[in-house]
Image (cartoon, rainbow, N blue to C red):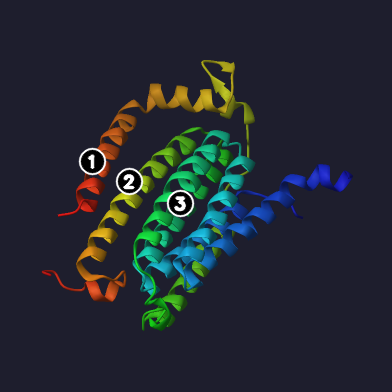
């Protein structure tokens, strides 16, 4: 009855995905939004690893390494943009970065 | 003891799944981004444990190194760099947050409904797949490396170019004018 199957991992993955999506869309602080993006990418990784185990196929693990790579690059560039925005506006609130030409 | 030997891995799954979800909720609800970052750290470590439970030892350790070690330090540096004194009087959520919450719950219900209905097929797990490289049982790192460097070499090289581009972009964005 307690036995953990792939579906359990998928439910955890869905929970992290929807929580992250809520954070991306609802929060106003850009740092928190970037952290929510990391949550979403992590949930994708859980999905990949769960199905890799389910299908006994190593390719899911390989793909999750690439996801981690992209997440690292995204975090570096996103935080660089955040620093540039903070130099320009003295704020990290997304609503105050609504102009195309500063 | 009998219970632990037969259900230990399952109990560990429930523990770490709970930690991951609680940490994620902390990220999106805590006001101070510093607490949010530490909450995110809990999620990262719990997810790494979930990877270990599914025979992905290498990816689990990489998760700890890259996320808990690298990305988390980056976040903490940036949080300390920007001035967060004005935070208390700011609103936490935007005006659309209620709609977003309802949509997120609906999306979760949609996912859960379809995947609980779906027949995923029996788990025919062959654990030896995850440790076999060149036909020998060497270990998970060797298996991942062998697979990566023989069958997925081109994406690997593209990832290295991607990291170079991201590094240059971050340096250019972060430098003083």
Q: Name the residue tied to disc 2.
A: A73
Q: Nearer the viewer, mark 2 or mark 3?
A: 3
**Which numbered tag is attached to residue B72?**
3
**Which numbered tag is attached to residue B16?**
none
Instruction: Tell me if residue B92 comes above or below residue B161 in the rendering.
Output: below
Q: Nearer the viewer, mark 3 or mark 1?
A: 3
Q: Quadrant of the C terminus of chain B?
A: bottom left
Q: Secondary structure at mark 1?
A: helix
- Mark 1 belongs to chain: B
Please tell me which residue is depicted at 29% across the width and 61% down the height of the picture. Answer: A82
**Quarter of the figure with residue A62:** top left
Kindly check if marks 1 and 2 are in contact, taking CB atoms under 8 A apart as contact. Answer: yes
For the residue carrying disc 1, how many other residues have a C-alpha within 10 Å: few (<14), some (14-19), or many (20+)? some
Q: Name the residue tied to disc 1.
A: B165
**Marks 2/3 same chain:** no
- Mark 3 belongs to chain: B
**Marks 3/1 same chain:** yes
């Amino acid at each position: 009855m307690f036995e953990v199957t792939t579906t359990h991992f998928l439910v955890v993955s869905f929970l992290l995905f929807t929580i992250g999506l809520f954070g991306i869309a609802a929060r106003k602080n850009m740092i928190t939004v970037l952290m929510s993006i990391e949550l979403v990418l992590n949930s994708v990784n859980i999905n990949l690893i769960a199905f890799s185990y389910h299908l006994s196929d190593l390719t899911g693990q390989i793909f999750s390494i690439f996801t981690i790579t992209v997440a690292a690059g995204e975090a570096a560039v996103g935080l660089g943009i955040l620093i540039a925005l903070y130099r320009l506006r003295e704020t990290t609130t997304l609503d105050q970065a609504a102009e195309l030409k500063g | 003891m009998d219970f632990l030997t037969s259900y230990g891995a399952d109990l560990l799954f429930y523990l770490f799944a709970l930690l991951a979800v609680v940490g994620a909720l902390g990220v999106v609800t805590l006001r101070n981004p510093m607490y949010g970052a530490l909450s995110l750290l809990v999620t990262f470590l719990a997810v790494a444990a979930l990877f270990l439970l599914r025979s992905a030892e290498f990816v689990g350790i990489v998760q700890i190194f890259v996320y808990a070690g690298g990305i988390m330090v980056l976040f903490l540096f940036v949080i300390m760099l920007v001035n967060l004194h004005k935070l208390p009087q700011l609103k936490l959520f935007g005006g659309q947050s209620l709609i977003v919450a309802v949509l997120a719950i609906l999306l979760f219900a949609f996912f859960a409904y379809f995947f609980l209905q779906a027949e995923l097929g029996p788990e025919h797990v062959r654990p030896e797949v995850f440790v076999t490289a060149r036909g020998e049982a060497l270990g998970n790192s060797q298996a991942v490396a062998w697979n990566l460097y023989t069958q997925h070499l081109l994406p690997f090289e593209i990832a290295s170019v991607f990291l170079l581009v991201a590094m240059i972009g971050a340096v250019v964005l972060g430098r003083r004018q």
